[in-house]
Amino acid sequence: MTPDDRRQGLARWAEAQLGAAGLELAPASNDASFRRYWRLWHGERSLIAMDAPPEKEDSARFVRIAEMLRAIGLDVPEILAADLEQGFLLISDLGRASYLDVLDEASVGRLYGEALDALVVLQARAPRTGLPPYDEALLRRELGIFTEWLLDGLLGRSAAEIEGGPLAAVWDHLVANALEQPRVCVHRDFHSRNLMASAPGPGILDFQDAVIGPVTYDLVSLLRDCYIAWPPERVEEWARGYLDRAQQAGILRPGDEDRFTRWMDLMGIQRHLKAAGIFARLKLRDARPGYLGDIPRTLGYVMTVAPAYPELAPLVDLVGEQVLPACNGLIARQKTD
């Protein structure tokens, strides 16, 4: 079935659910997955129709986690109707403005404060049963996205050769750091494009891949965002604010602050390597070249943080001397094509 066929089928299904005719669906977001979102109007109310091809996406998981998060008081879409066999959902609309759309010096303090409050609720109150573990196998698969799609696919380097050299020890350090942290519910994409500036805020999207894993993963996703960067001193201030909240909520214990910075720094490096690999995959596999421009910012965090850790020196050398220059060259050529 073509995308247009699915759009027409989704429209007919939504009309049947709402008892309406002639609904018009307008694109509502540019998602990096196989899901597509459409905005429609029913009377005075805007709703979102979601198309998640069942062979590509698990809508049952989306519904289950949405209901779980709403039950603990987080602002996620309400499931109004669902046809899991077709992969069609009708959900409430959290608005048009993401954090990325509205973040500036005037708004960032309030918005990040609200996001950190929501993160603590997620970590302190979300059930820890029924979600898969963010275990060693998953961590290593994610690091493999960097080597397979960015090093090998985008830059033509042999992933097997690189992973078998000094980088293998770096991977071991990153995985061990993630596994030693306290375990909480992890959203896995808690950043400015998935947080909506809605009331009560923030509206939270793209939660269907939630797992039980490292306490600093979502924090570093927010504060060292792949799509927007803030001065290191601001990031440190927000991180301290989170640490206070987490200790008061019992998520972290007294004494964890001694390891907290390392936990966050190395967790961020693992995430940013994965994200850079995903951006390369979006360009190569999905013909979405715009994501190439997000790679330098994402790997820039690696170059800012990793030099403080001598055990990560092979990664610093690889990214700084080879990967970033090559990616910047590809971006420059893409702009002239």
Image (spheres, rainbow, N blue to C red):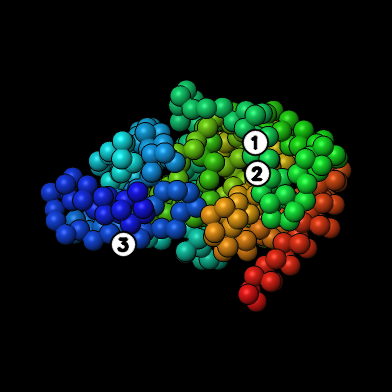
Q: Is residue 109 above or below residue 81?
A: below
Residue contact between numbered discs 1 and 2, judged by CB atoms under 8 Å: yes
Reading the chain from its start, which is encountered first: label 2 or label 3?
3
Q: Is residue 187 visible?
A: yes
Residue farthest to the top? 129
- Callout 2: few (<14), some (14-19), or many (20+) C-alpha neighbours within 10 Å? many
Amino acid carrying label 1: it is Arg
Residue 145 tag number: 2
Residue 184, percent across and down? 55, 30
The CA distance from mark 2 to mark 3 is 33 Å
The CA distance from mark 1 to mark 2 is 7 Å
Closer to the camera, 312 or 239? Answer: 312
The CA distance from mark 1 to mark 3 is 36 Å
Residue highlighted by disc 3: 26
**Which residue is at 53% across, 45% downward?**
189
Residue highlighted by disc 1: 141
Q: Is residue 244 left or right of residue 91?
A: right
Quarter occupied by the C terminus: bottom right
**Which residue is at 14% across, 56% downward?**
21
Residue 258, percent across and down? 74, 35
Q: Residue 292: name its quadrant.
A: bottom right
Q: Label 2's element? A: helix
